[in-house]
Amino acid sequence: MDTLLQPKAINFKDELNEEQYNAVTAPIGPALVLAGAGSGKTRTLTYRVAWLLSQGVQPWEILLLTFTNKAAREMLERVENLTGVPAYKFWGGTFHHIGQKVLRFQGDRIGLERNFNIVDAGEAESLLGEVIRDADPGFLKDKNNPKARVVSDIISYARNTCSSCAEVVKEKYPYYNHLIEKIPLFHEKYQERKRKQQVLDYDDLLECFLQLLEENEDIAQAYQERFKSILVDEYQDTNLLQAKIIDTLGVKHRVMAVGDDAQCIYTWRGADFENISTFPERHPGTLIYKIETNYRSTPEILNFANGVIDQDVTNESYKKILKAVRRGKQKPYFVATVDTRQQAQFILKRVQGLLDEGYRLSDIAVLYRAHFHAMDLQMELSKQGLPYQITSGVRFFEQAHVKDLVSLLRFASNPLDEVSFIRFSSMLPKVGARTAAKLLKLARDLAKDEKVSVFKALENDKVTKKVPEVAKEAWIDIVYTLQDLYDGMGSIAPEKAVELAINGWYGDYIRNLYTNWRSRVDDLESLQGFASRYDEMTEFLSQLMLLSSETSDRSVELSEDCLRLTTIHQAKGLEFPVVFLIGVADNLFPLKRAIEEGNVDEERRLFYVGVTRAKDELYMSYPRVTTQGPPELLKPSRFVAEMPKDTYESLYMGER
DNA sequence: AGTCGAGTTCTTTTT
DNA sequence: GAACTCGACT
């Protein structure tokens, strides 16, 4: 009977090693899979899904939670290839994505409208800034007080760790102890303000999700019954809030958590690998599976990696030693260069050598701790005309012109969203946040009195006469665009809406504002292309806000074969035949700030993640002098210095 | 009161 | 390069 539903016959025993096979075929029930780097974690998860299907579990009864959008996409793609079951049939995505989806349907139970908007970190910060200015006008002017950014960090950390702002201040920001009353107050006002505007920040997507489940027994039960199996990837990087969501959803003891405590690199966002060690207590009957065979790297690289993580003393709970199966080649290189320019030249030269040996550019990745470490390298690459793809700080959807345009759509979709209103209004001459807020209030009052929509009220004389003279013409144009968008909100597709907005006032505006308006219009057109993938406005807008990993690398899209530059955080889960780790010096990696704050162990785990991305060859390098800021002499990173000398090979460039 | 432009400083990691 | 500050201008 169960063979009827089995889409493709898979011989699990033949295609997996014993460790993987045991985890994949674990009985349905709570399970913890401790999978070391390069041990085939994704493969295990993919086959687990296939195995569940073979046991008669339906795709929509499986929930797959990942940490990034990319991971979710890749995983489901592999499942589709393996089983033939299309990816969309599963519930899969980031915690934020799933939270958004559930809240869209059932958020009304906790006071959310269906068309709530999502604000990104920057918008959340400026909203908080406004709240603070309202509650305490002098606060941000005082240099001794934290900036809105820092207050935002404190609040966010508290929310993600399910603790109070007061506790976070006490433990992580003792020098702000005198603000221990104020910050919770800001927090409270901030929550109110968001709710009033029907906007959610990233943390809300998790927090409200949990709240919904906790306060509504029937909804919680429905999901608990629905999901026969919940798979969680990168479990070591979940925070307490996420762990609670999983525990609530998986109360029927059906969670399989997959992770590696040695790769926990998100504690700054509240991740807590204790979630792993206490998992068996919270899920009685948990079976534990260890996968330690590494298929990725050469023994030399693994030996080095094992040594790196061995120095981490905080983390003894589930010690793993990765076992290599590959044959050796050569030890990792550690190269000292004179400065960042020479470091760049070294990489270019070595890349050329690798190409001669038969590697392709796409086999090679350059990894670093922070984006700005790669600045010189970028310049050198451009100069030499070597194609590269960088997943850089500024992401496609975060570019100003994209956000400007989207703010029109967002306001049309949710007219309570003041953040968006202020954004597009501020583009007008002589209009800033204050004037915009005033105009909106005026229009709202008017709409209420005369029982018309806000969009109609915006064109009323009483409002327009408060618009600065120079901005009047543009104002009317915007209002018409908004009205068109609003009228079509229920009926027109997102693609059409984007088109409407581009052809309206905004299209003219950027042509006059930017000299490179051509490429900006191109961006907006690709946004339109992206919109065509969605039928519903709210879905499209949410995706925009949650898909930050979509990058703005239009210059290289043409050539597939190019060098990859990324931060280690973004390289998590990826592998490359050849890896260059740059900036491997104390104060760069580990970062100065991390040393000062005593977070070296997290940096070490991050270093470990970087090292274990490499399959065949690993090059670590550092500049002896940095000219970023005041010139400074750098020493080799302690992560390398503390290693036995015979685990790597030192090279020296330039004069001593 | 609020906007604008010039000049200055400092860059972590992500949903 | 962006985010901030400061002083001038409307």
Image: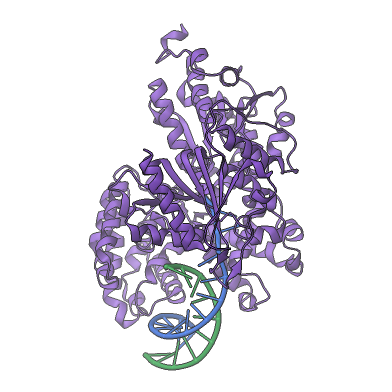
Chain colours: A purple, B blue, C green
A410 to A311, vertically: above or below: below
Near-viewer residue (C9 or A197)? C9
Q: Quadrant of the C terminus of chain A?
A: bottom right
Residue A272 placement: quadrant: top right
Q: Is residue A448 left or right of residue A144?
A: left
A59 to A134, vertically: above or below: above
Residue in the picture at 52% in, 40% down: A613
Residue A134 placement: quadrant: bottom right
A455 to A29, vertically: above or below: below
Q: Which residue sits furthest front?
A: A655
Residue A551 placement (x, y as % from top left): 40, 51
Total marks drawn?
0
A209 to B12, vertically: above or below: above
Residue A434 placement (x, y as % from top left): 47, 76
Residue A255 placement (x, y as % from top left): 61, 28
Near-viewer residue (A586 or A209)? A586
Residue in the picture at 42% in, 69% down: A440
For the question of whether residue A386 can be seen, the reply is: yes
Near-viewer residue (A399 or A538)? A399
Near-viewer residue (A480 or A632)? A632
Q: Is residue A45 left or right of residue A554?
A: right
Q: Which residue sits furthest top?
A: A1
Residue in the picture at 31% in, 82% down: A469
Residue A278 placement: quadrant: top right
For the question of whether residue A217 can be seen, the reply is: no
